[in-house]
């Protein structure tokens, strides 16, 4: 069927509401818009679905949610009756339609005879990962688009370990979605009927308490918090999202007396009215928090994204202003602090390990190795970090202290298998209190780490390529880089070309070809003669190619100069 045929089929379907029909009627003379909505299905990857909301096959709406859930239900049914009886946990965030989409997913699972545990209201993503593990579910679904703009929503799927769906199962869901008719295939049932029959069970405070008990068990040094609690002030914002309840509660249980929440951003709102983007990676979103921090004399600002899996911080500098600490810097601070705190409290395991992704700062490896830890890389995504953690711990090779990635995601403890802003917020605050007791802000602490471990600088370039043409441009860029592998970038020699697709490593000077441990991902990496690493990878969730610059040098200025030089090269890749 052509995209026009698919459009007409949707328009004729009795499954559509009057509002959806009107939305599609309104574009009948706009061929480009029709094509953008019906040229294909939203791609179901290992992270599930993500896209802008609206009527159409390539949009997020109740029909696409039901269709995906039916395909996922069939994958679960094929696991056998025991797996089916374990059921599915379902969670949702603050976004527009998230509650509706979650309920629709629950009704489809129930309609397929799969029991559901559905959260009564919005909850942090890590609590969904926890619930899957805690209740022994076979799978989980989380309706969230994380930190994407307000127009987006998403459908994230989890397997029995509490991590996102393994590629094998994700591929099977995608295959079934291609086979199943979007409307005719769906088995569903009435929500109230499913609840009354016990096919949908509602989760609430009892699960929060179980989750929080595990979060609080990660505390290393409550005594130091008690010591500074009367004077230490911090500001917190959930950016209108799911961290609004559990993060302030965890900080209160830690012993914090002065947690000042940004009132405008404590309001749950999927339109995110106070920010352009609800992403803690974007410093401009913290403007209200900075105003409060300056007024109240706070040194530390903490913000979680709408589904509370990522967390960003700002800290007061020597001149009284506030500075963003990057995801890489935050991870390094956390790793160094955890090693010290666990040594002091006698909690450091016998074979401690740090995990990071291939695009995350190499400073983490330096911190780990100087302190006698092993450090392993994985592909981007907490699914891979979770797999590596399980593999190391089940084999007895090591115990993971911290897993993190540069995009503000941190995983601590063993009760979740995903990014966890609730636990990270707790330990970041404990760390800030510990340094406050030393008379230092986290900015001072970071400067001290550079003096100790050497200077590192990173930057992520987002080469945005929107629309249908964008997908083609992204693919073409990766093809061109493979067909004409650079031997020099920005006037500096490339020493090694690494292709994570086939795991190949080419030493440029000799042409010698070897292989590395990681393979199977569309990522290219260049090791430069000046010690910089450059990584190029298409985003799996947004229409952009990301270029990661990982530099190190003799000083901050040296790092900055390298980063600026390679950033200029990255800009030329847009074409």
Image (cartoon, rainbow, N blue to C red):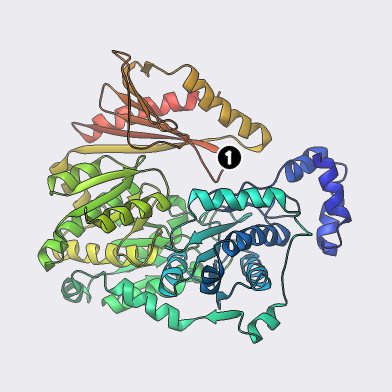
Q: Is residue 318 visible?
A: no
Query: Viewed as shown, does residue 21 lie left or right of 272?
Result: right
Q: Residue at x 69, y 51 (%)?
A: 59
The residue sitting at the bottom extreme is 196
Image spot of residue 85 (x, y percent): 54, 74
Q: Quadrant of the N terminus?
A: top right
In this rendered view, identify the residue nearer to me: 400 or 112.
Answer: 112
Q: Quadrant of residue 99?
A: bottom right
Q: Quadrant of residue 191?
A: bottom right
Query: Viewed as shown, does residue 492 lie left or right of 203?
Result: left
Image spot of residue 340 (x, y percent): 14, 58
Q: Is residue 6 visible?
A: yes
Label 1 crowd bin: few (<14), some (14–19), many (20+), radius 10 Å: some
Compared to 192, does 556 lie above or below? above
Count the numbered circles shown: 1
Q: Regarding mark 1 in the picture, which secondary structure is present there? A: loop
Compared to 256, does 427 lie above or below? above
Image spot of residue 74 (x, y percent): 63, 61
Compared to 474, does 281 lie above or below? below
In the picture of the structure, the residue carrying the numbered disc 1 is: 543
Q: Quadrant of the C terminus?
A: top right
Compared to 221, does 441 lie above or below? above
In this rendered view, identify the residue nearer to me: 526 or 108.
Answer: 108
Image spot of residue 529 (x, y percent): 27, 21
Q: Residue at x 27, y 32 (%)?
A: 559
């Amino acid at each position: 069927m052509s995209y026009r045929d698919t459009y007409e089929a949707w328009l004729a379907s009795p499954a559509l509401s009057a509002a959806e029909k009107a939305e599609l009627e309104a574009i009948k003379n706009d061929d480009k818009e029709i094509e953008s909505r019906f040229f294909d299905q939203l791609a179901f990857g290992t992270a599930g679905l993500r896209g802008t909301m609206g009527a159409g096959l390539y949009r997020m709406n109740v029909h696409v949610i039901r269709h995906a859930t039916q395909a996922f239900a069939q994958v679960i049914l094929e696991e056998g009756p025991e797996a089916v009886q374990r059921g599915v946990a379902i969670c949702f965030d603050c976004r527009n339609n998230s509650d509706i989409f979650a309920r629709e997913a629950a009704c489809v699972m129930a309609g397929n005879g799969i029991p559901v545990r559905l959260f009564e209201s919005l909850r942090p993503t890590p609590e969904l990962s926890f619930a899957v593990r805690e209740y022994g579910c076979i799978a989980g679904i989380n309706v969230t688009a994380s930190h994407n703009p307000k127009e987006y929503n998403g459908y994230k799927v989890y397997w029995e370990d509490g991590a996102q769906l393994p590629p094998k199962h994700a591929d099977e869901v995608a295959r079934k979605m291609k086979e199943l008719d979007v409307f005719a295939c769906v088995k569903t049932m009435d929500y109230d009927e499913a609840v009354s029959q016990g096919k949908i069970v509602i989760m609430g405070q009892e699960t929060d308490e179980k989750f929080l008990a595990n979060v609080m068990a990660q505390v290393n040094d409550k005594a130091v918090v008690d010591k500074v609690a009367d004077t230490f002030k911090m500001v917190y914002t959930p950016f209108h999202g799911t961290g609004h309840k559990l993060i302030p509660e965890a900080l209160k249980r830690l012993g914090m007396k002065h947690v000042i929440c940004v009132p405008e951003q404590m309001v749950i709102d999927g339109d995110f009215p106070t920010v352009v983007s609800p992403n803690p990676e974007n410093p401009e979103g913290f403007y209200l928090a900075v105003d409060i921090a300056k007024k109240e004399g706070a040194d530390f600002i903490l913000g979680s994204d709408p589904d509370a899996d990522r967390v960003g911080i700002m800290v007061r500098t020597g001149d009284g202003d506030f500075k963003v600490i990057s995801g890489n810097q935050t991870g390094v601070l956390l790793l160094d602090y955890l090693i010290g705190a666990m040594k002091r409290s006698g909690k450091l395991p016998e074979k401690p390990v740090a995990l990071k992704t291939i695009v995350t700062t190499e400073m983490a490896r330096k911190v780990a190795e100087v302190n006698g830890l092993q450090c392993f890389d994985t592909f981007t995504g907490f699914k891979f970090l979770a797999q590596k953690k399980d593999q190391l711990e089940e084999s007895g090779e090591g115990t993971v202290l911290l897993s993190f990635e540069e995009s503000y995601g941190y995983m601590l403890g063993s009760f979740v298998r995903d990014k966890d802003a609730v636990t990270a917020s707790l330990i970041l605050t404990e760390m800030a209190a510990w340094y406050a007791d030393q008379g230092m802000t986290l900015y001072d602490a970071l400067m001290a780490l550079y003096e100790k471990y050497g200077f590192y600088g990173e930057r992520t370039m987002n080469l945005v390529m929107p629309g249908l043409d964008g997908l083609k441009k992204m693919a073409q860029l990766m093809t061109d880089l493979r067909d004409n592998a650079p031997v020099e970038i920005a006037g500096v020699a490339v020493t090694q070309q690494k292709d994570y697709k086939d795991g190949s490593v080419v030493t440029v000077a000799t042409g010698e070809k070897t292989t590395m441990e990681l393979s199977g991902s569309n990522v290219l990496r260049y090791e430069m003669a000046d010690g910089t690493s450059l990584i190029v990878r298409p985003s799996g969730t947004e229409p952009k190619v990301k270029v990661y610059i990982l530099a190190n040098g003799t000083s901050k200025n040296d790092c900055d100069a390298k980063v600026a030089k390679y950033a200029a090269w990255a800009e030329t890749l847009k074409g």
